[in-house]
Image (spheres, helix red, strand yellow):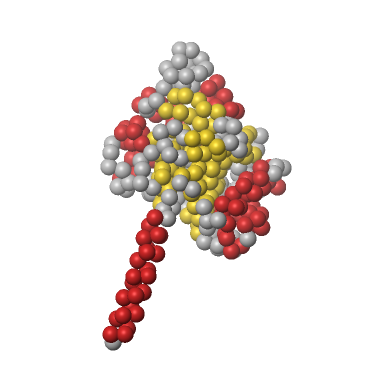
Amino acid sequence: MYRKYFIFSILCLLLLPMAGFSQQAKSFKIVPLGVKGGADESNLSAYIVAATGTNDYICLDAGTLHAGIEKAIANKVFNLPVEQVLRKYIKGYFISHAHLDHLAGLIINSPDDTAKTIYGLASTLQTIKTHYFTWESWANFADEGEAPLLKKYHYQPLVPDSSIAIKNTAMTVIAYPLSHSSLTSTAFLVKSNGAYILYLGDTGPDEIEKSNKLHKLWEVVARLIRSKKLKAIMIETSFPNIQPDKTLFGHFTPNWLMKEMNNLAVLTGADAIKGFNLIITHVKPPQVNIDKIKAEVKAANKLGFNLIFPEQGKEIDL
């Protein structure tokens, strides 16, 4: 009996450091403010991300802000009013491309926001500057473009493949161009204390897009997956498999998503992929299609990804 107790005690002592390591291994917290790709204006693409232990968030796309923060408060993620979360916690915006479902929340909430930086590829910022923050469309809350300039927001163009420090946070980011039909979209590789998260704006498979941009991106992140430094890939799947290729318009179906994941696995090795966090974003209503997307992604998950379907206002810790 005493021998069994001794062995049990030793095992507990050995497992305690492992439990501590598991807790320390959390590097990021992600709060989805919007997870859908259209129709529901209260739940459009927007994810705020901070290093664990801080409230210095960046917003990856900004289709929905206010309604998403309200959901997060209801879920006890934040204990501040909506306006204070918006003004104090969000330190900057990273816009993958200038479609309305990725920046409407930023535009609409701009009167109540504080001074911040809007990061994006030069082409994305140019569209925001000339189509949204103008006095005919809204008001120019930025420090460039149509006069008078209200100078609340500063545009920071991102140079592809170059790391940049994110103002008022301890994080850095590298931007990578993506093909989104006739438009250039963006992937953001966010780094904090040696750990990474990869967020992809809207894009489609290389084969359909007649592009090699995803292949180049997989080459970059494959080593981070092998070394277990990349915590997750956040990637869109907009349509169920029934959607014809000719009407994908720069988006993924579950089958095309897993074909690209197979391409990634060739570079990482299948063992490195098993259990890796794959966060599915930008699912398009109606709900029957969203249900199909989830079922089809699960059915096609032969590589053994840890699939995460984010819910508005519910924190994800990685």
**Residue extending furthest top?**
148
Count of marks, rendered view: 0
Q: In which quarter of the image is residue 267?
A: bottom right
The front one of 296 and 46 is 46
Residue 41, how many percent across, how many down?
44, 37
Q: Is residue 12 above or below residue 277?
A: below
Residue that appears at 52% across and 51% down:
230
Q: Relative to 143, is 281 above or below?
A: below
Return the x and y of residue 146 as percentages of the image width and height: 51, 15
**Location of residue 231 in the rendering, given as x and y in whole percent from the top left corner:** 49, 52
* Image quadrant in which the N terminus is located: bottom left
Which residue is located at x 66 percent, y 45 percent? 216
Q: Nearer the viewer, residue 288 or 268?
A: 268
- Up the image or down, 229 lies above or below 303; here it is above
**Residue 73 placement, left or right of 317:** left
The foreground one among 317 and 314 is 317
Q: Is residue 39 left or right of residue 4?
A: right
Q: Give the quarter of the image for residue 297.
A: bottom right
Q: In the image, residue 72 lies at what x, y percent?
A: 34, 44
Residue at image position (46%, 28%) is 117
**Relative to 34, is 218 on the left or the right?**
right
User: Residue most toward the bottom?
Assistant: 1
Q: Which residue is drawn at 48% across and 49% down?
A: 195
Q: Is residue 257 visible?
A: no
Q: Is residue 15 visible?
A: yes
